């Protein structure tokens, strides 16, 4: 009952003042970000952070959160119509979405994706509303050893799931941790790795890193791809599936909702993971698996529902523990900190109006997106026709102005360009960039909790495993790392066998 009252209070805040308008602006920008190849939720959220500097914290986070889950909807449009994923999670939708479009069923694919996204997003937010208040007491039981173990779990998840090999994931994780150590040491105040440059004494600016790695790097990669593979969008006609397809579609949406939400609770995952798991599950449960890859409606409904349900679940570790479960959540965590808010269990105690207004705005945003997607799908599809050679330079120009506005410094602009080029080169080398942002923002928490744990255990780090929660998390981390290495070796072995054959 208390959760319902708090949620109703949140709706009152979300509907008041400019908050409703900012929610609409956020989901609309998110749709465009998702539609445009070369951008994505991480890039869109990072690039828009400077715009929120003069806004109230609740309005800023409502708009940025809207960009996040709005881009999940928008990414489906380019995926289905031109076989170019608007964002990473939509890669799985390519497998059946585009084949449906080639059969003249592009509208049905977009309609099913919109319905599944709405159901998955809404149910996951309801779940957040119900379980978050009960998890606050559990989160308050977390001490330094538990936080250290949780960050280690997130690190191993990132290494195992972020790339095609554990080694590539490890390279990205180590790079993120190294960047986090630049500046004053949090415990002693001793300058570290600042290379004699005064601007580095305060450390690197996360917004600059995020805008470069996700914004500029994605734009450069997307521009390269759009020039290589220009394509004409399919025509959008009927939006709803046939009567005999509703049963299978509803089951796929139900399974995708549950799968996506629980994946969102795990630090270090991304929306690609639940989408891939959902697709694999639907194919395994299908009476005729051969339909998949040929335009199976379940291959669109399940993954699209899962990646939107993931968004709701991902807010639980962010709000309760201050642990981002994905790259976009790391960007949002940076936005929280910039606006003077520290995610964690005390956020529910000290700023309940803020937390519940953000949760309520997600209900409103999902409803707006459903209305914007079903009747207006044809209009959104026209955004794809904007020439990349005009669009990308404009986005880069706006990004440079936004970066400069962070502290009115050309140093930040230089950092934006350097990390943009670095991100582009890493993508070309097939090294994931998301772990860099995740571990950069978690690096300080990891170091602080490690030092406090050493103080508690008088220098004996191995005593962490004697704590039930911390020990369990460390054990799970070890298992994930072992399984990831084993899976990588098996995949490599199968690859060489295929080459020899």
Image (cartoon, rainbow, N blue to C red):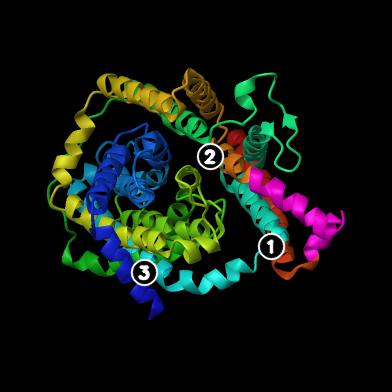
- Point out residue 212 in the picture as x, y percentages from the top left corner: 47, 28
Q: Is residue 137 above or below residue 481?
A: below
* Rendered residue at 42%/24% (across/down): 404
Res 279 → quadrant? bottom left
Q: Earlier in the sequence, mark 2 or mark 3?
A: 3
Q: Nearer the viewer, residue 93 or 440?
A: 440
Extreme residue in the bottom direction: 1
The quadrant the N terminus occupies is bottom left
Q: Nearer the viewer, mark 2 or mark 1?
A: 1
Label number found at residue 126: 3
**Circle 2 — which element?**
helix
| Tag 2 near tag 1, CB within 8 Å | no
Q: Earlier in the sequence, mark 2 or mark 1?
A: 1
Q: Residues within 10 Å of mark 2 (few under 14, many from 20)?
A: many
Main secondary structure found in the magenta portion: helix
Quickly name the residue at label 2.
434
Q: Is residue 412 above or below residue 351?
A: above
- Point out residue 406 in the picture as x, y percentages from the top left corner: 44, 30
| Residue numbers of the magenta segment | 444-465
CA gap, disc 2 and disc 3: 28 Å
Quickly name the residue at label 1.
143
Drawn side of residue 130 relative to residue 205, left or right: left
């Amino acid at each position: 009952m208390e959760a319902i009252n708090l949620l109703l209070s949140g709706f009152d805040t979300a509907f008041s003042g400019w908050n409703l308008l900012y929610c609409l602006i956020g989901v609309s920008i998110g749709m465009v970000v998702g539609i445009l190849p070369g951008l994505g939720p991480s890039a869109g959220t990072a690039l828009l952070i400077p715009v929120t500097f003069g806004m109230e914290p609740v309005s800023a986070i409502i708009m940025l959160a809207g960009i996040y889950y709005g881009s999940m909807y928008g990414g489906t449009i380019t995926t289905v119509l031109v076989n170019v994923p608007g964002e990473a999670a939509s890669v799985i939708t390519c497998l059946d979405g585009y084949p449906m479009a080639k059969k003249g069923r592009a509208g049905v694919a977009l309609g099913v994706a919109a319905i599944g996204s709405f159901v998955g997003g809404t149910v996951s937010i309801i779940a957040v509303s119900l379980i978050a208040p009960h998890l606050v007491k559990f989160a308050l039981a977390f001490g330094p050893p538990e936080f250290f173990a949780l960050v280690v779990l997130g690190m191993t998840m990132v290494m195992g799931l972020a790339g095609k090999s554990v080694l590539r994931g490890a390279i990205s994780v180590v790079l993120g941790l190294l960047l986090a150590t630049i500046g004053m040491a949090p415990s002693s105040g001793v300058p570290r790795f600042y290379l004699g440059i005064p601007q580095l004494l305060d450390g690197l600016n996360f917004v600059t890193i995020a805008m470069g790695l996700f914004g500029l790097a994605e734009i450069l990669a997307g521009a390269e791809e759009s020039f290589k593979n220009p394509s004409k969008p399919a025509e959008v006609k009927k939006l709803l599936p046939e009567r005999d397809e509703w049963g299978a579609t509803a089951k796929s949406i139900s399974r995708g909702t549950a799968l996506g939400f629980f994946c969102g609770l795990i630090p270090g995952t991304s929306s690609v993971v639940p989408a891939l798991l959902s697709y694999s599950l639907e194919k395994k449960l299908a009476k005729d698996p051969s339909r998949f890859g040929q335009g199976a409606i379940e291959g669109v409904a399940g993954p699209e529902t899962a990646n939107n349900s993931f968004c709701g679940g991902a807010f639980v570790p962010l709000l309760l523990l201050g642990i981002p479960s994905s790259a976009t959540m790391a960007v949002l965590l940076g936005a929280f900190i910039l606006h003077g808010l520290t995610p964690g269990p005390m956020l529910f105690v000290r700023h309940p109006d803020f937390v519940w207004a953000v949760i309520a705005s997600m209900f409103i945003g999902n409803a707006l997106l459903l209305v914007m997607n079903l009747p207006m799908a044809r209009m959104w599809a026209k955004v794809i026709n904007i020439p990349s050679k005009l669009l990308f330079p404009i986005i880069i120009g706006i990004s440079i102005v936004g970066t400069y506005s962070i502290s009115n410094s050309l140093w930040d602009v230089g950092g934006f360009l350097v990390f943009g080029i670095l991100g582009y080169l890493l993508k070309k080398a097939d090294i994931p960039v998301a772990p860099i942002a995740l571990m950069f923002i978690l690096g300080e928490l990891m170091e602080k909790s490690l030092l406090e744990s050493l103080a508690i255990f008088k220098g004996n780090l191995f005593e962490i495993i004697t704590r039930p929660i911390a020990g369990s998390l460390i054990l799970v981390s070890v298992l994930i790392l072992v399984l990831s290495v084993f899976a990588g070796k098996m995949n490599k072995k199968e690859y060489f066998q295929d080459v020899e054959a």
